[in-house]
């Protein structure tokens, strides 16, 4: 995403949404944030994604995460589309979702945040908004960004998993290995000297022997 890197303060934009006009930092408050964009309303993959996000909203709320979606269409379109999304979830076709949807009809935010997919065009030949995921910490800094093409739907279980990892590693000097899930063992980072590791991680440190003889694969129980 041009101009915005991990650790940068996320832009404090203003926008119209399905819950009214917002200032982004004010909307987040002291919470974590997940901003996820969509090519446009009333499209099949987007409908399945927002349906899944709505189903998982209680899990994100448990983790003090505020979710907010973005699509290039208008607020009235978003409200009408929300009925379809709720119906897709086999629920009452109402206009409200557990999170707001930003209206970006002029693509201003899509351009500013590097969301456009140049390979996917709408009926007017304009680039559509790609499927971006931005996770923002309570300090308003960007902690993670994932950019999917418009043709590939996201995995919201994975987004929840990385939130768990980000929140854990924000409070403890550990790292999470491949396919980590809450409750699994974590890794002792290279910046923790061998002599200090056993003092810091009192539950014990397991070091895997490797052909190189280097003791860098160090595991410990997940901190509580």
Image: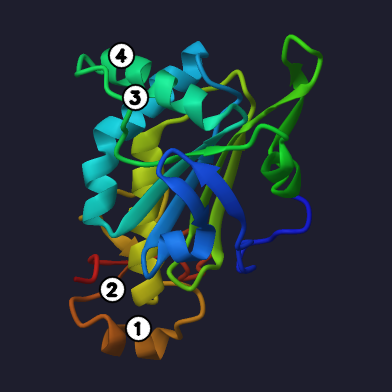
> Is residue 179 at least partly visible in the picture?
no
> On residue 51, which mark appears?
3
User: Alpha-carbon distance for marks 4 and 2?
Assistant: 47 Å
Residue 192 versus residue 172: which sits nearer the camera?
172
Label 4 sits on a secondary structure element that is helix
Q: In this view, does 141 lie to the left or right of 222?
A: right
User: Alpha-carbon distance for marks 3 and 2?
Assistant: 42 Å
Residue at the image position 41 percent from the left and 26 percent from the top:
79
Q: Is residue 130 above or below residue 146?
A: above
The reply to whether discs 3 and 2 touch (Cβ–Cβ < 8 Å) is no
The local crowd at label 4, few if under 14, some if 14 to 19, many if 20 or more residues have their Cα within 10 Å, is: some
> On residue 88, which mark appears?
4
The reply to whether discs 3 and 4 touch (Cβ–Cβ < 8 Å) is yes
- Nearest to N terminus: mark 4 or mark 2: 4
Q: Residue 163 location, x and y as percent? A: 38, 54
User: Alpha-carbon distance for marks 2 and 1?
Assistant: 7 Å
Quadrant hosting residue 201? bottom left
- Nearest to N terminus: mark 2 or mark 1: 1
Residue at the image position 28 percent from the left and 41 percent from the top:
57
Label 3 sits on a secondary structure element that is helix
Q: In this view, does 95 lie above or below 208?
A: above
Residue at the image position 52 percent from the left and 68 percent from the top:
140
- Nearest to N terminus: mark 3 or mark 4: 3
Label 2 sits on a secondary structure element that is loop
> On residue 197, which mark appears?
1
Residue highlighted by disc 2? 205
Residue at the image position 45 percent from the left and 46 percent from the top:
20
């Amino acid at each position: 995403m041009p101009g915005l890197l991990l650790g940068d303060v996320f832009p404090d934009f203003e926008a119209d949404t399905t819950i009214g006009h917002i200032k982004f930092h004010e909307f987040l408050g002291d919470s974590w944030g997940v901003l996820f964009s969509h090519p446009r309303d009333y499209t099949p993959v987007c409908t399945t994604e927002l349906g899944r996000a709505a189903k998982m909203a209680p899990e994100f709320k448990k983790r003090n995460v505020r979710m907010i979606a973005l699509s290039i269409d208008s607020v009235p379109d978003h409200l009408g589309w929300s009925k379809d999304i709720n119906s897709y979830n086999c629920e009452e076709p109402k206009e409200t979702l557990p999170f707001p949807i930003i209206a970006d009809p002029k693509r201003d935010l899509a351009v500013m945040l590097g969301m456009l997919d140049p390979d996917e065009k709408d009926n007017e030949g304009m680039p559509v908004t790609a499927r971006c995921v931005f996770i923002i910490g309570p300090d308003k800094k960007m902690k993670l960004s994932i950019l999917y093409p418009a043709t590939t739907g996201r995995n919201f279980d994975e987004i929840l998993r990385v939130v768990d990892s980000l929140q854990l590693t924000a409070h403890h000097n550990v790292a999470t290995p491949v396919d980590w899930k809450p409750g699994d063992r974590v890794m002792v980072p290279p910046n923790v000297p061998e002599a200090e590791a056993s003092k810091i991680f009192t539950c014990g440190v397991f070091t895997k022997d490797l052909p190189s003889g280097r003791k860098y694969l160090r595991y410990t129980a997940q901190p509580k």
